[in-house]
Image (cartoon, rainbow, N blue to C red):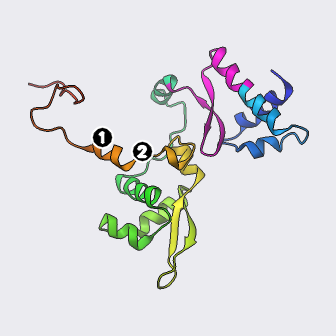
């Protein structure tokens, strides 16, 4: 591996978050953007070809060294890795509304959910999953929320365009019609009498 690839590897290994290419380029003032891109490719190939238990992933607006998916379950089972706090169902619903409708205000999110979401928005702000992105034009100039790079990282997305389309979600969440179990494209019930 070339010295620049080693430097990038050390920085990526030390970071708990994805590092944007621009920050990686700042590690070596003499490295061109093409040299940084080539070093990242070399590093990714090194992990892939040599069969390492980690991989270099482009997500959340930057690069990160992560455990390969095939080892995640064993590591979690052994409780070796620190488990992130998982958002509640209500928090995930609120987060989905913000992700798909951003920029969006508290009143609109509350209207969609049918309940006050002030506490949930505060929790999502504290966790760094959403942020205030603008002020609305309406009465009182309400705060408008959007997702953050940490949101992308937590959901393994490179950008918001990778969110499932709403029509895809409707199909995935629809209930199979009665009598359709076992037909192609429908899940088969397991176990039981």
Q: Earlier along the polypeptide chain: callout 1 or callout 2?
A: 2
Q: Is residue 155 left or right of residue 48?
A: left
Point out residue 76 in the picture as x, y percentages from the top left corner. Answer: 48, 30
Point out residue 154 in the picture as x, y percentages from the top left corner. Answer: 52, 44
Residue carrying label 1: 172
Query: Front-most of 167 and 110?
Result: 167
Q: Residues within 10 Å of mark 1 (few under 14, many from 20)?
A: few
Q: Secondary structure at mark 1?
A: helix
Q: Is residue 54 magenta?
A: yes
Q: Which mark, by number, is residue 150?
A: none
Point out residue 6 in the picture as x, y percentages from the top left corner. Answer: 80, 27
Q: Is residue 128 above or below residue 72?
A: below
Q: Is residue 16 left or right of residue 84?
A: right
Q: Is residue 126 left or right of residue 188?
A: right
Image quadrant where residue 110 sits: bottom left
> Which residues are the magenta region?
42-69
Residue at the (60%, 45%) spot, across then down:
60
Question: Farthest residue toward the top?
Answer: 50
Q: Secondary structure at mark 2?
A: loop
Q: Is residue 56 magenta?
A: yes
Residue at the (62%, 26%) spot, across then down:
55
Residue carrying label 2: 164
Point out residue 13 in the picture as x, y percentages from the top left corner. Answer: 71, 33
């Amino acid at each position: 591996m070339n010295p620049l690839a080693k430097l990038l590897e050390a920085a990526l290994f030390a970071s708990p978050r994805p590092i944007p290419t621009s920050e990686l380029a700042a590690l070596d003032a003499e490295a061109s953007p093409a040299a940084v891109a080539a070093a990242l490719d070399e590093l990714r190939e090194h992990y892939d070809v040599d069969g390492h238990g980690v991989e270099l992933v482009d997500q959340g607006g930057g690069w990160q060294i992560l455990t390969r998916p095939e080892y995640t379950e064993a590591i979690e089972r052994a409780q070796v890795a620190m488990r992130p706090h998982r958002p509640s169902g209500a928090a995930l619903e609120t987060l989905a509304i913000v992700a798909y409708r951003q920029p969006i205000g508290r009143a609109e999110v509350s209207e969609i959910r049918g309940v006050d979401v002030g506490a949930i928005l505060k929790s999502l702000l504290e966790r760094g999953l959403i942020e205030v992105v603008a002020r609305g034009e309406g009465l009182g100039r309400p705060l408008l929320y959007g997702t953050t790079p940490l949101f992308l990282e937590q959901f393994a997305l490179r950008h918001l365009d990778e969110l499932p389309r709403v029509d895809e979600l409707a199909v995935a969440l629809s209930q199979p019609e009665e009598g359709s179990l076992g037909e192609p494209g429908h899940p088969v019930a397991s176990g039981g009498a």
